[in-house]
Amino acid sequence: MSPPPPLPRWADVGLIPLINVFAALVVSGIVVAIIGENPFEAMMVMIKGAFVYKGSLGYTLYYATNFIFTGLAVAVAFHAMLFNIGGEGQAYLGGLGAGLTCLLLDSMLPAILLVPLAIMASAGFGAVWGAIPGYLQAKRGSHIVITTIMFNFLAASIMVWLLAGRLKAPGQMSPETRSFSENAELPFIHDIANALGMEMARSPLNLSFVVALLACVGVWVLIWRSRLGYAIRATGHSTKAAEYAGIPVSTIIIVTMAISGGLAGMMAINEILGVQHRTILGFTSGYGFTGIAVALMGRNHPVGIVLASLLFGALYQGGAELDFEFSTITREMVLLIQGLIILFSGGLAYMFNKPLAHLLGALLSQRDRTSHTEAGQNG
Amino acid sequence: MANGGSGSPLAIELSDINKSFGDVHANRNVSLTVVPGHIHGIIGENGAGKSTLVSILYGFYGADSGTIRINGETTTIRNSADAIGKGIGMVHQHFMLVPNFTVLENVMLGREGSLSVETGARKAREALNKLSQDFGLAVDPDMIVEDLPVGLQQRVEILKALFRGAEILILDEPTGVLTPQETEQLFDILRALRKQGVTILLITHKLKEIMAITDDVSVMRGGEMVAHLQTADTSPAELAELMVGRKVLLEVDHTPARPGAPVLDVQDLCLTDAAGIDQLKQISMTLREGEIVGIAGVSGNGQSELLDVLSGIMAPTGGHFTVGTNQITAERPSDPAELRDFGVAHVPEDRHKCGIVLPFSAAESMILGYSGGDEEDGGWWLSPSKLEESCAGRMREFDIRPPIPKLQSANFSGGNQQKIVLAREISTQPKLLLVGQPTRGVDIGAIEFIHKQLIALRNEGCAILLVSVELDEIMSLSDRILVMNNGQIVGELAREDADETALGLMMAGIGAEEKDAGSAKGAAS
């Protein structure tokens, strides 16, 4: 009946995500067992597929790169209590920004200038695509969840229209731009490693991963070390307090959504500059949405987001391996398992909080009773 | 403790009640006996455990240990339905009424009695009429609740409890929202209920009320019962000392003011809200250096809006005000950041929603409103170590406990949260300090400290505008008192001329004949 004592921070941040993932794996295991496969064997295949096989780690990190960007995007917005569901569309538009820059300039500028410019363009396009719903929320009261979802559809339609029309490579049938020149390529990590004399298997992992890690540091500094971050968090925790403090709440909402959209837009550099070297249809393939689960699981903290991104990267890569190894486990079954993880660590993220809090509370108070500590009075 | 005398069992008998929330031992071996037909007061500071205790009695929480006996019978109360079944009724501090329902509909809510609301309503109407007659609680059953004055709304709450068969009535801080006259009416009702044999448990932090109405009083401090007394045998000073655990100065050391140059000049200030309602009507006043001007009024008569406009949170829709040489009008509104630059500091009425950010550390809450920062202050960046260092200094200066800058603002007691706000606003050495409800939800010890700080600030030459619903506070701190009713200033009294009756009449809109004879009729209940 009585409310449980608050969950200690270590349990909230460390234990709860592990329990959530474990619960998801148990349910997945039951599903695998029902279709007649050995769940433990399947688990081993996934782990090996994600980390052990040659080049698999590179793939895992390549997927994780996408999730870091989209996860950070959701997290930054969340600190201002904004649910940015539009990462998918912002990333898509980011791809347009990077693509247009490269199409226009790849014959003129060297890589050292073109690549940073293309990164900025992807962030800029994403930022605009995030800032518009931000503006509508701040000035017009249109709910950000609704507008960002609608902006995903708008982005998808614009991209189809452009890639099947104006931007389509001449004489091509497929809806994509021409390939960019080498000046627009972010180098692969295995190429860098080989150049340094280290053996490394081929994988799509490229320098974007490093950019993603830098973005994590940047977000941490922004949120917890800058005056803007202070204003963002104050707005998020209490709009009334922010108004009282003279923080321009509408501006903060728009700026936060621009930063969030910019981070989501930067996801495109991994796909467009890093791997595809052209802008293609549907390259975002749901990473923007998965970013929501990543941010939830990572508790909106960059470190948590890196860890959650690794998990989801491993799921994507290991899942592909699962599909390959078992004839009964199809691509759809892998999607189901991924869905379960998202369900447990995203949708049901707080399901185990209360029971765990009760359990820990009982354990701790038992310890207290035996040692008889003085409890302070706290109004 | 004395028994009822007639040998009837005690109405309430709690023994050794314990309740902990995590590390906080909110009730420790609390025992309480209440004689039937008595008005029994429970007094204590905020966080003393009063609310926890009545929550246990009313079934909101289960006690960790201890026994409850109602009318001599040992019982367990698992939820409020259990409590109601045992004849316990509760009138909450914040009314639990559906504002757009009629009195009758509110009273019968959850007790419709039959599938057809009509039949239930007929029975409820009869019962309600009988109750009204028996206890002298006249309310028109067909009035919409939100159209009733607060005092009558409270009456509906009491009727609701009686309708459910309450013989033991718990009132949690019932006078917080009432004018002195309404408070007196409430006490009349309570006396009538006592005559009819109803047992009343009155939770309050106001010593005066305990002395005025109760038969017995129990004092709580730090989760424990520290004394059970008969009201006739005690004094406010003794109760205050028991509540705080040390001697307290109930009177503020108030020296005559030496007002200087005008700091704030308000002319015909108006505010019309989005719904087209005039919240402020032609407010004019002047504040000078080194004086405290109190605004008395029943809450909801425009005081909050006045603070919001003067602090820049809301723009006026008419008139203007001048701070120093800066004029703020509807055409040229300001914002809180700019007004802070003009030397206006603001202790907001609602410290939980505005004054601090609960999940922030104390150090972070300590710069709320001042997070813009100067260039030499690190420009775009914040340094937590610097914030914590300066916060630690202010914590020492203002005796904020515990003195841990990293601790979440939510984990400080009400009094210490208020000290965080006050420390922040006073440290800027403002020319004008706007203060809303400085001691709401603050314990006596901290009240004493806060009052001293305000007087000291005044003596240094700051102009202070004090808004409070606590008349005692207004009267003991202010050099001049303005009374607000229905969005306008209806009168001004010098400190020497102010007494509760005069203020109370003005607050109710009576005695403002020279201003507006019509409004007086509407406000009288």
Image: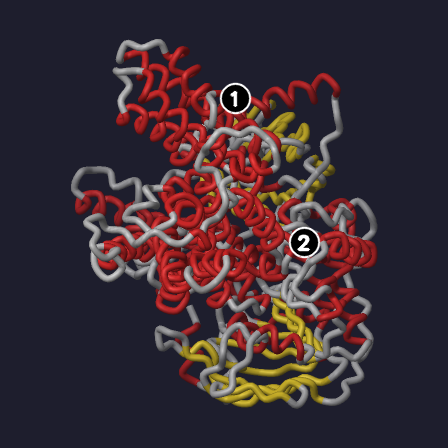
Query: Neighbour class for label 2 at 10 Å: few (<14), some, many (≥20)?
Result: many
The C terminus of chain A sits in image quarter: top right
Name the residue tied to disc 2.
B417
Query: Neighbour class for label 1 at 10 Å: few (<14), some, many (≥20)?
Result: few
Query: Which residue occupies 36% across, 19% down?
Result: A27
Q: Chain of mark 1?
A: B
Q: Relative to residue A136, is residue A85 depicted above or below?
A: above
**How far is mark 2 from mark 1, CA to CA?**
40 Å
Q: Secondary structure at mark 2?
A: helix
Q: Nearer the viewer, residue A339 or B254?
A: A339
Q: Nearer the viewer, residue B14 or B92?
A: B92
> Taking B32 as reference, is B141 left or right?
left
Residues tagged 2 and 1 counted as in contact (Cβ below 8 A): no
Q: Relative to residue B338, is residue B143 depicted above or below?
A: above
Residue B385 in picture, x, y percent from top left: 76, 52
Q: Secondary structure at mark 1?
A: strand
Sequence order check, earlier mark of 2 and 1: 1
Amino acid at dot 1 = Thr
